[in-house]
Image: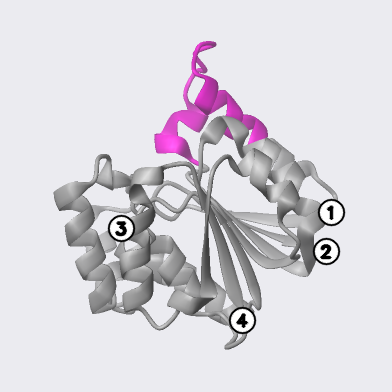
Amino acid sequence: MYFLPEKLDDYVVAHSQEEPELLQQLTRETYQKILQPIMLSGPYQGRVLSMISKLKSPKTILELGTFTGYATLCLAEGLQNDGHIDTIDVNEELVDFQRKYFDQSAYGKQINQHLGSALELIPLLEHTYDLVFIDADKPNYSNYFHLIIDKMNPGGIILSDNVLWHGKVIEPLDDKDISTKAVLDFNTLLKEDSRIETVMLPIRDGLTVSRKK
């Protein structure tokens, strides 16, 4: 979803950091072989994720929703040398695809893949986190927040994707639209929870940055 006129958006992209070659290859293969390639973060948002990670310089990152590993690699660019990422996804068919690109990067040994339900796996993780990226099933966004907030280090950052949900957040709500209702509730939660401070950015489909106090 684009909020700027196309020419202005093109200008923004043209004057931002270029996408690394490995991520270009990952994107091409995702579009060739994987269903719903639109789920990729994409080059511009990927550079935003990379920049935030570099500014934070996290030692520990948690990602909910790996897909083909594009955002994982963007976030890994800011990792400390002895840091690591735990990334969770339910799609067993994508594990080898992800690992191929992880191992071609400089961060392969720092990326831990977890296969299964994030709701079940998050409580089992022993680490606390400096940076969390939520980009999984929308109906569970609020559940994920409640599971991770106590695992966040002070000053930790939560990045939440798709918070504008194709613009549906400002349209009349269909009672049967569970995902939109979940995103609306999640956005309210982030705004009102006293443990964090939050700013929503109109980047692509919406990206919220929340900082644990």
Task: State the residue position of label 3.
Answer: 97
Residue at 78% from the left image edge and 58% from the top image edge: 151
Whether residue 96 is visible: yes
Task: State the residue position of label 1.
Answer: 195
Report x, y in % for residue 173: 52, 17
Name the one closer to the observer, 197 or 12.
Answer: 197
Tell whether label 1 touches label 2 (CB within 8 Å). Answer: yes
Q: Is residue 145 left or right of residue 170?
A: right
Above or below, 135 against 209 in this view is: above
* Rendered-image quadrant of the C terminus: bottom right
* Total labels drawn: 4
Q: Earlier in the sequence, mark 2 or mark 4?
A: 4
Above or below, 12 against 151 in this view is: below
Residue at 49% from the left image edge and 70% from the top image edge: 75
Q: Which residues are magenta?
A: 164-186
Closer mark to the observer between disc 1 and disc 3: 3
Name the one closer to the observer, 95 or 82.
Answer: 95
Closer mark to the observer between disc 1 and disc 4: 4
